[in-house]
Image (cartoon, rainbow, N blue to C red):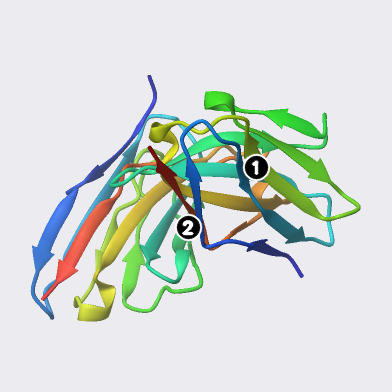
């Protein structure tokens, strides 16, 4: 069975400090993994994706994520938070080229000035 | 640029009325999806289509229907709106071949009074 667990429902950081949003997955197949961001009253936008190439994936706006098969994790990081990063972030697992897509419950990121 | 257009963006209706939410895409993707987003539930799949004349039920399809007469459009119909269907609805598309990445519209907020 496939599943996605985002370990924190809310994360609060100060502007200029690092961001870590945690995601664990379970999959019987080789998955594709994604992080999406959703700003208020907007649709989901792709931040980055892992598709069995390099395990360290760089995305937009300075975000990156590392695929760790041994830990079944795909945590999202950013060295320095910006106020504009405040949003909801979704970790997503896709198998067989998208035949099945599973969304995490989301992590809301708050950025304090 | 290719895009996904949802309309209306906001709608208020009464219990028992029929409502149709439109989704129009210019990505030329065969795969189209409708999700609803609710606090505490994340994104849940309502219906999906893998091509013209193809429609399938998702995990929360009761009270909803879709039809696919062309590649560009997948309208979502609520036959008899209920207060439990108050939600934000997202249309998404995905290319037939690829990594499973989804492309999202900006959402339609529906309130059923």
Cα–Cα gap, marks 2 and 1: 29 Å
Residue positioned 38% across, 19% down in the render:
B1
For label 1, the residue is: A76
Left/right of residue B99 with respect to residue B87 in the rendered view: right
Residue A107 horizontal/vertical position (percent): 51, 56
Residue A87 horizontal/vertical position (percent): 41, 45
Tag 2–tag 1 contact (CB < 8 Å): no
Residue A16 horizontal/vertical position (percent): 51, 30
Q: Is residue B31 visible?
A: no
Residue positioned 30% across, 49% down in the render:
B107
Q: Between label 2 and label 1, give the one nearer the viewer.
A: 1
Quarter of the figure with the C terminus of chain B: bottom left
Tell me which corner region of the image, top left, top right, bottom left or bottom right, holds residue A38.
top left
Residue at the limit of the structure toward the top, as seen here:
B1
Same chain, marks 2 and 1?
no
**A85 or B110: nearer the viewer:** A85
Tell me which corner region of the image, top left, top right, bottom left or bottom right, holds residue B104.
top left
**A107 or B99: nearer the viewer:** A107
Dot 1 falls on a residue whose secondary structure is strand
Residue B83 horizontal/vertical position (percent): 20, 79
Q: In the rendered view, would you say A100 is above or below B59?
A: above
For label 2, the residue is: B48
Mark 2 burial class by Cα count in 10 Å: few <14, some 14-19, many 20+: many
């Amino acid at each position: 069975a496939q599943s996605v667990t985002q370990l924190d429902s809310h994360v609060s950081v100060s502007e200029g400090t690092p961001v870590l949003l945690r995601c664990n997955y379970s999959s019987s197949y080789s998955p594709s993994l994604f992080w999406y961001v959703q700003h208020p009253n907007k649709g989901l936008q792709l931040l980055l994706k892992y598709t069995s190439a390099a395990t360290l994936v760089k995305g937009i706006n300075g975000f990156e994520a590392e695929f760790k098969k041994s830990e079944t994790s795909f945590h999202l990081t950013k060295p320095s938070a910006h106020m504009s990063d405040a949003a909801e972030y979704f970790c997503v697992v896709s198998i067989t080229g998208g035949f099945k897509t599973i969304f995490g419950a989301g992590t809301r990121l708050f950025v304090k000035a | 640029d290719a895009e996904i257009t949802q309309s209306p963006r906001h709608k208020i209706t009464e219990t028992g009325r029929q409502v149709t939410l439109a989704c129009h895409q210019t990505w030329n993707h065969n795969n189209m999806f409708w999700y609803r987003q609710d606090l505490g539930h994340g994104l849940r799949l309502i219906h999906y289509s893998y091509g013209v004349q193809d429609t399938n039920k998702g995990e929360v399809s009761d009270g909803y229907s879709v039809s696919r007469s062309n590649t560009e459009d997948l309208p979502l119909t609520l036959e008899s709106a209920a207060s439990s269907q108050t939600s934000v609805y997202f249309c998404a598309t995905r290319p037939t071949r690829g990594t499973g990445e989804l492309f999202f519209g900006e959402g339609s907020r529906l309130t059923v009074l």
